[in-house]
Image (cartoon, rainbow, N blue to C red):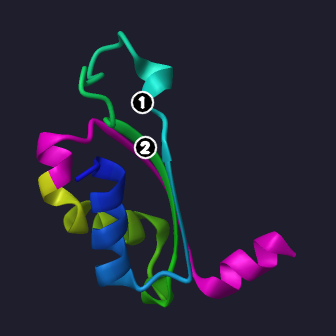
Amino acid sequence: MQVANQIRDILTEQFAPVELQINDDSSKHAGHAGADPRGESHFSVLVVSEKFEGENRVNRQRMIYSALDALLKDRVHALALKTMTPDEYKKLAG
């Protein structure tokens, strides 16, 4: 299974996001330290979930890192996160 699909499945199951965007940025890092020759090692992820209500940015990221722990240890070298509540996302989309 592709790593992006694994990320999508895990985050969908644990966070029931109203918006989930996963971008594979691995091609931007080809040849750099941490770049996996198999690809799919660098991602940018947007997660919009009610589960983030009342949590600060650091706690939200910890929640995501905890959910993706196995992938982070084995396949994912870099993960750029944007975590928002549905209200925060609505305000941004304006």
Q: What residue is drawn where x is 81% and y is 72%?
A: 93
Where residue 32 sits, quadrant-wise, is top left
Start-end of magenta stretch: 71-94
Residue 21 place in picture, x, y as percent: 54, 61
Q: Marks 2/1: CA distance?
A: 7 Å
Give the left or right position of residue 12, taking residue 36 as reference.
Answer: right
Residue 77 place in picture, x, y as percent: 27, 35
Which residue was labeled with disc 1? 26
Residue 45 place in picture, x, y as percent: 48, 55
**Dot 2: what SS?**
strand
Where residue 91 sits, quadrant-wise, is bottom right
Is residue 58 shown above or below 24? below
Q: Mark 2 or mark 1: which comes first in sequence?
A: 1
Magenta region includes residue 80: yes
Give the left or right position of residue 48, taking residue 77 as reference.
Answer: right
Q: What residue is drawn where x is 75% and y is 81%?
A: 90
Which residue was labeled with disc 2? 43
